[in-house]
Image: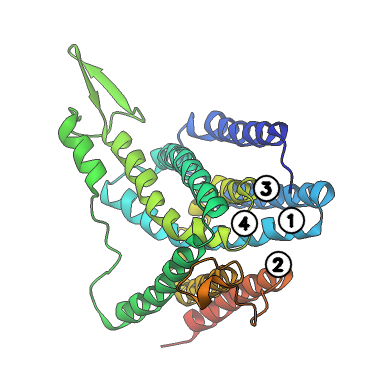
């Protein structure tokens, strides 16, 4: 896929425009969004992603469009898992409901910038060192197994294994800079009596951005397992994260009902991990594996198969979770 600088500029304009619309239209006037508002904006962002995929289809063909859709759905499903942590962070810092939109928007913008660096680094590694697919694949398989073990452990334990723990970055910021005792409206920085201080809202933004970065360690390798094009990887990441804020308010009270989500994510991550390892074997150059020869006896799954597996898995997660939570007793 040949991507011109103009395409990158266009994507940057789209991302910045959507962030500005969000900020000017919502976060600038703090308010807890209604269910109708959150639903409308969530459907709007999904529609934008669909239209973007059609534009990729028209300009680059069905294969790359399928790769975008598969990457977007994978990132979107993994982002739903992020929402659990976002809820815990906002609860731990006791962020007022009307300020949560601004915190989420700025946290997501921070995450997009950090993820862009990760994607460019990953693209460089993939381009020059094909053996990195072994590492990506093994890590995703490990993550898939951990998803299942954590889910089963959570079922058997009365403790909350996902309880938020303040990370080292936010602790460092709090110790390094003077912080106000409480929220000062929706300000990030407050000046009082000639002294400039940061507010807890800024610490929340940092916590959200750095927490999301932890998720990037498995989501970005997962998308690289579906497409090696950094333009499509960032496109899928951007469209999934941009709609995450409204999705948060839409399913805030429904996340506890997605009881089988960890198992669905384990299937997706495990499949992509094995797909990456298989691709690494096809491109093998490591002398201690088959004397550096490629191993091709297992065909690589097509983009259509990968996309279909992701869609079916997510549908099964939603249906079985709803059936389970509606079951009496």
Specify the farthest residue to the left.
175
Residue 106 higher or lower than 295, as above or below:
above
Q: Determine which residue is flagged by label 2.
A: 303
Residue 52 drawn at (x, y percent):
73, 47
Instruction: Let me know if residue 253 appears in the view.
Output: no
Lower position in the chain sequence, tag 1 or tag 2: 1
Which label sits on residue 72? 4
- For numbered disc 2, what is the local secondary structure? helix
Which label sits on residue 64? 1
Lower position in the chain sequence, tag 4 or tag 3: 3
Residue 324 drawn at (x, y percent):
49, 83
- Seen at 20% across and 42% down, the residue is 171
Q: Quadrant of residue 285?
A: bottom right
Q: Marks 2 and 3, how far apart in space?
A: 26 Å
- Seen at 40% across and 49% down, the residue is 213
Q: Marks 4 and 1, how far apart in space?
A: 12 Å
- For numbered disc 4, what is the local secondary structure? helix
Specify the farthest residue to the bottom.
329
- For numbered disc 3, what is the local secondary structure? helix
Tag nearer the camera, 4 or 2: 2
Q: Count how many numbered circles sit on residues in the image.
A: 4
Which label sits on residue 107? none
Q: Marks 4 and 2, how far apart in space?
A: 13 Å
């Amino acid at each position: 896929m040949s991507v011109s600088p103009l395409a990158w500029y266009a994507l940057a304009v789209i991302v910045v425009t959507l962030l500005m619309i969000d900020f000017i239209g919502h976060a600038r006037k703090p308010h807890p969004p209604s269910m109708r508002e959150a639903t409308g904006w969530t459907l709007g962002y999904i529609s934008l992603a669909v239209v973007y995929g059609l534009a990729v289809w028209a300009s680059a063909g069905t294969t790359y469009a399928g790769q975008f859709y598969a990457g977007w759905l994978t990132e979107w499903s993994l982002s739903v898992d992020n929402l659990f942590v976002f809820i815990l962070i906002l609860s731990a810092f006791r962020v007022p409901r009307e300020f949560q939109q601004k915190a989420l928007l700025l946290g997501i913008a921070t995450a997009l910038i950090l993820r862009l660096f990760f994607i460019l680094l990953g693209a460089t590694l993939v381009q020059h060192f094909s053996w990195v697919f072994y590492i990506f694949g093994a890590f995703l398989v490990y993550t898939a197994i951990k998803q299942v073990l954590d889910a089963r452990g959570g079922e058997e334990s009365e403790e909350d294994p996902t309880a938020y723990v303040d990370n080292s970055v936010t602790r460092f910021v709090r110790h390094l800079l003077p912080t106000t005792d409480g929220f000062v409206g929706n300000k990030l920085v407050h000046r009082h009596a000639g002294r400039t201080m940061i507010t807890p809202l800024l610490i929340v933004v940092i916590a959200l951005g750095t927490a999301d970065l932890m998720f990037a360690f498995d989501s970005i390798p997962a998308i690289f397992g579906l497409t090696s094009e950094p333009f499509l990887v960032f496109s899928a990441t951007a469209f999934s994260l941009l709609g995450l804020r409204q999705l948060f308010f839409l399913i805030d009270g429904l996340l506890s009902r997605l009881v089988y989500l960890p198992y669905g994510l384990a299937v997706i991550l495990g499949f992509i991990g094995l797909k990456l390892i298989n691709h690494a074997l096809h491109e093998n150059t490591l002398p201690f594996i088959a004397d550096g020869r490629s191993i091709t006896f297992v065909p690589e799954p097509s983009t259509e198969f990968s996309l279909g597996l992701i869609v079916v898995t997510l549908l099964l997660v939603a249906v079985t979770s709803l059936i389970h939570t509606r079951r009496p007793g």
